[in-house]
């Protein structure tokens, strides 16, 4: 039982009446009657609240949450009292969110139920623990409040962003990937895999005319080609300390994991095989490239518990183990981060070795906050110095792209928020140019 604010306010007023009775006697009598009525009201309020267990509440949410996305949580509150009540619902959300405002107030009529919805956005993968649901009920009298403890404690696993996969899936089915910023790349030349011969129609490329078939049919026939299929795409994810940098609450590793899942999904939709490689000071996880049913779930489970380390990554170990595990020429999409040109030069020999055996695409990150700072005008001498230093760091990032290009290595400099879109665009571009 909890005494409400109204209880204390009325009690203080009664005490003031009784105290004033020492000066003006009729007020003491009024105070006595007020105290008696107050006592009866408290008894009536307690009886209305405690005669039955009148409140049920339970939590409804997905079995797993998607990292970096808004995940819906719903609380269903049902009133079994034969009279209206006011309820205050407090949900004990996982402490990692550091939120104490998940509190909702509503009115429930007799035998009425309502659903209360809110969203949670996790920024790291792992197990999140929900507590119980606390419901505080007051009657119209409003002197007492009864607390109900409902629901059960619940552990939710937070996986890499599978909600993003669902959005891409719906758009890919309707061939509307351009709505997400995916560019339509004009295809240059002809694809190498023959598909079929069909009748010539106006607009077909005359270079695809099959003259032998045309001679047999006495009408123009053209060859139809399709994209090369079953190429291997490996997302190679660096888990070293350079990937611990955070952007909007999520580490670069989390952004890389989300982008690798989306790229794997798009590649498999285009009949390519997708695989995963993670490494830090040692070669860690290896999932062979495949496009079989259920492979996306395998990728999800393998990326679920990946965490960054505080050590330097060993690119030499990556080269050795990739030679053992990946024998067919593949596209390697390497997610890492170079803070300076010197850090890239230390790994350049290993990047060249990977690029000789496979097609390598190095994906690293620009600093979005630094870019915004450069865009703001300097106001004093110190500000100009700071801008020069900031522009030097930004120039070094562009210089890394240029250096990699000089050594025949493809690269992509992007921001974390645009990573998924830019990686898919780059993949589609390289596929259309037959660079895989």
Image (cartoon, rainbow, N blue to C red):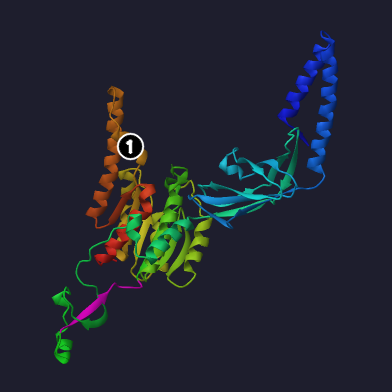
Residue 139: give x, y in percent of width and height: 73, 38
Q: Which residues are magenta?
A: 220-230
Whether residue 212 is situated above or below residue 142 in the rendered picture: below
Disc 1 is placed on an element classified as helix
Residue 351, quarter of picture: bottom left
State yes or no: residue 351 in magenta: no
Q: In the rendered view of the protein, which quadrant contains the N terminus? A: top right
Left or right, residue 430 beside residue 163: left
Instruction: Examine the rendering and report whether any part of residue 353 can be seen.
Output: no
Q: Depth check: 21 or 297 in front?
A: 21
Q: Is residue 149 visible?
A: yes
Left or right position of 373 against 204: right
Q: Nearer the viewer, residue 415 or 35?
A: 35
What is the residue that sits farthest to the top in this orientation?
23
Q: Quadrant of residue 361?
A: bottom left
Q: Residue furthest front?
A: 26
- Please tell me whether residue 31 is drawn above or below residue 246 in the rendered image: above
Residue found 26% across the figure and 65% down from its top: 432
Q: Label 1: which residue?
A: 372
């Amino acid at each position: 039982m909890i005494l409400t604010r109204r209880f204390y306010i009325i009690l203080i007023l009664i005490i003031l009446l009784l105290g004033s009775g020492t000066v003006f006697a009729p007020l003491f009598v009024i105070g006595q009657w007020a105290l008696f009525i107050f006592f009866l009201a408290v008894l009536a309020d307690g009886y209305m609240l405690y005669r039955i267990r009148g409140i049920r509440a339970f939590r409804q949410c997905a079995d797993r949450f998607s990292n970096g996305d808004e995940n819906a949580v719903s609380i269903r509150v049902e009133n079994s009292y034969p009279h209206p009540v006011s309820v205050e619902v407090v949900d004990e959300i996982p402490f990692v969110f550091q939120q104490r405002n998940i509190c909702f107030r509503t009115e429930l009529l007799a035998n009425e139920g309502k659903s209360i919805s809110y969203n949670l956005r996790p920024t790291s993968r792992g197990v999140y623990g929900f507590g119980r649901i606390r419901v505080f009920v007051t009657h119209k009298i409003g002197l007492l409040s009864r607390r109900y403890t409902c629901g059960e404690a619940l552990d939710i696993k937070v996986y890499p962003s599978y909600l993003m996969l669902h959005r891409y899936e719906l758009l890919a089915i309707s061939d509307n990937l351009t709505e997400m910023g995916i560019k339509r790349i004009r295809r240059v030349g002809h694809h190498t895999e023959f598909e079929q011969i069909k009748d010539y129609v106006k607009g077909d490329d005359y270079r695809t005319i099959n003259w032998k078939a045309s001679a047999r049919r006495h009408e123009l026939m053209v060859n139809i080609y399709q994209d090369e299929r079953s190429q291997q795409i490996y997302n190679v994810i660096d888990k070293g300390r350079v990937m611990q940098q955070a952007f909007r609450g999520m580490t670069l590793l989390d952004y890389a994991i989300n982008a690798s899942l989306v790229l794997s999904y798009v590649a498999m939709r285009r009949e390519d095989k997708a695989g995963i490689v993670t490494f830090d000071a040692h070669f860690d996880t290896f999932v062979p490239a495949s496009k079989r049913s259920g492979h996306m779930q395998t990728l999800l489970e393998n990326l679920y518990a990946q965490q960054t380390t505080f050590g330097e990554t060993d690119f030499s170990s990556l080269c050795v183990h990739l030679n053992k595990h990946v024998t067919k020429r593949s596209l390697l999409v390497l997610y890492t981060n170079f803070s300076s040109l010197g850090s890239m030069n230390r790994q350049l020999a290993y990047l060249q070795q990977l690029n000789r055996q496979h097609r390598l695409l190095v994906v690293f990150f620009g600093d979005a906050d630094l870019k915004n700072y450069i865009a703001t005008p300097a106001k004093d001498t110190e500000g100009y110095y700071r801008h020069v230093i900031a522009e030097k760091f930004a120039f070094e990032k562009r210089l890394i792209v240029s250096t990699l290009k000089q050594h025949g290595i493809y690269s992509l400099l992007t921001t974390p928020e645009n990573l998924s879109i830019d990686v898919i665009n780059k993949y589609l571009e390289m596929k259309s140019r037959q660079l895989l």
